[in-house]
Structures are given as C-alpha cells and as structure tokens.
Amino acid sequence: MKKEINGKTKIIGVIGKNIENSLSPLFHNQIILKHSLNFCYLPFKVTETDLSEAIQGIRALNIRGVNITFPYKEKVIKFLDKVEESARRIGAINTIVNNKGILTGYNTDVIGFKKSLQEDGKFTIKGEKAVILGAGGAARAVVYALLEEGIEEISIFNRTLEKAEKIKLALSPFSPKSRINIFPLEERRLKGKIEESHLLVNTTSLGMPPRVDNTPLPDEKLFHPDLLVYDLIYHPARTLFLRQAERAGAKIINGLPMLVYQGIESFYLWTGLKPEGKEVLEMIKKREGIRIK
Ligand code: ATR
C-alpha cells in the first residue's frame, strides 16, 4: 500500500508541548494506510504562548481535527466554539473536530480509560476504592470515568491542592453516591488510602522524558500486591513508578491501551471509521517492541 498526499488530503494531528515521543502519528497513519483513507496525521509542537493562534490555525488551514495532549487539555477550552456535554462537565478535552469552521471539543479519554481497564479483564470498578495521583486534565477524565462506573471512593493526591478541590467541586454532583477525598501529594494519609485501594493511577507527568528518574511515589513500601497500578505515561513503557510497583508484586498497566482506545474514538469523530482497538494495539506493540503486562 502506498500513501499519496494530494489536493484533497484531509489533515488531522496532535497539538502538545512535548510530542516528540508521541505514538499517535504512527498508529493513526497506519490505520489511514490500512483503510486507504485520504487523510494524514501530523504532530504539531506548540508552545503555550502560541496555543491560541494554533487553534485559530485549525480553522484557517481547514484542518479536519486534532488531538490535544499534555499540558493543554483544560487551557484549550476557551478557544473553542462548542464543547460536547460530558467534556464540558469534565472541564478538559482531548479532541477537536472542525466542521466548516466550527470547532467542537470532545473528551475521548474517558472511554479510552474505561476500555483500557476492560482489557485487563478481571478488574471491576463498581464498589472499589481508588487513589489518583495528579489533578490535571487527564486526572479529570479518569475521575469522571470511575464515577460513571460506580466507584465507591476516589482519593486525589496533588501537589497543588486547589486543583484537586476544583475537580471535586466540578465532578461530585454527577455521582452523589461516590466519595471524593482530596489531599496534598506529600500527605501522610497516602499510605492508608493506598492500603485500602485496589487501583492506583498516576496522571502526573512525573516519569516522562527527560526526567525519567522521577516518580510520584518515591517510597516503594507504599505499593502492595493487591493493587492494579496504572501509569497514564506510555513512554517509557515502564516508568520508574511501574517498575517500583512491579517489584512490590502489583499488577501494572501503562498508558498505551488508553492512548489507542482514546485515539480510535477521536479517529471515528474525524473520519466516521472506527478501527478495531485490539488490532491497533497489537500493531503498535509489534512495531515498537512495547511489552507490558
Ligand atoms: P494533563 O493535561 O496531561 O493532565 P496537566 O493538566 O498539566 O497535564 O497536569 C499535570 C499534572 O502533573 C498535575 O497534577 C501536576 O501537578 P500540579 O497541579 O501541582 O501542577 C502534576 N505535576 C507536574 N509536575 C509535577 C511535579 N514536579 N511534582 C508533582 N506533581 C507534578
């Protein structure tokens, strides 16, 4: 199969601050090739100062749509014309669709996170307790997904407590039966909360290149074997956080399945075609040699 760019090619892509290691261009373009679509997926590295102009550029250049990644998932909302209902509640988006100059924001991270947990097969969210590290745009989608699935309690630990508080205020009303606790990241109650939980999720950027020696949880004794430890980061495939968890006997999952599942939902919004998630995941693992689980 040969891909030809021509005058009718529709452009899609990803906007982020550090996207050099993004796998999105690779797998979106593979899907495009496989289905012989006249699309092309490009990486757009954008600084925060240029974010507004970059979003204007989507209209100006007639780009069909983009993914939005770290750290712009919340910041970008004010530049859009419309925001889909659940994305508005969440307060973060990861997908923009351009319909004749009208830019609409969506959040496909929620479904991406849920589907990645289903991949695991055995893990059920309902009635469980979870600890979430971080309170940025990605954390908002994770919290919302867990609430929708009937989690009993979520404890959010974040360096900036006010951001965790904002999530609690915004999302608590959608699930009155679930409890949301908030703590500073260094809080001593982290130990007790992790002990009570079966799910621990890192949504912070700690462990991403270039600071791959960083971990949100330096104390390895906090992990236990009954935990499913989830890191939203997929590069490196095994962050220090996941290696610590593995040494403690916990089950681990990295951000690759979520990347794929959110990506194919975004792909569907732009093209009307929904590829098979498992197939895409296997293709990436084969190409990149990413082994996890
Ligand atoms: P995303 O959209 O990917 O979630 P984000 O909104 O910038 O990105 O959120 C990044 C998260 O990583 C935040 O929870 C941030 O903590 P703050 O709310 O205190 O900024 C967390 N984070 C980033 N660098 C950190 C560091 N050095 N120590 C602790 N937390 C950090």
Image (cartoon, rainbow, N blue to C red):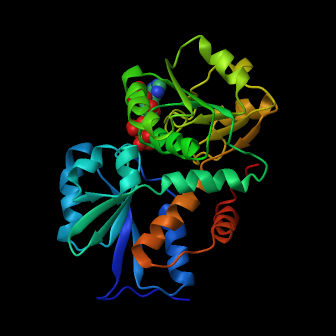
Q: List the single residue furthest toward the top.
A: 188
Q: Residue at x 58, y 28 (%)?
A: 215
The N terminus lies in which quarter of the figure?
A: bottom right
Residue 241 lies, with reference to residue 120, above or below; the image says: above
Residue 103 lies, with reference to residue 273, above or below; the image says: above
Apparent side of residue 103 relative to residue 280 in the rendered image (left or right): left
Q: Residue at x 46, y 34 (%)?
A: 172
Depth check, front residue: 145 or 8 = 145
> Is residue 293 visible in this depiction of the protein?
yes
Image coordinates of residue 68 in percent, x first then y, are 38, 54
Q: In the image, ligand 1 is in what quadrant?
A: top left
Q: Quadrant of residue 226?
A: top right
Q: List the single residue furthest toward the front.
A: 176
Q: Residue at x 52, y 37 (%)?
A: 203
Image coordinates of residue 217 in percent, x first then y, are 61, 23
Depth check, front residue: 38 or 135 = 135
Report the label total.
0
Q: Residue at x 56, y 56 (%)?
A: 112
Apparent side of residue 186 relative to residue 194 in the rendered image (left or right): left
> Is residue 256 visible in this depiction of the protein?
no
Q: Quadrant of residue 249?
A: top right
Depth check, front residue: 173 or 290 = 173
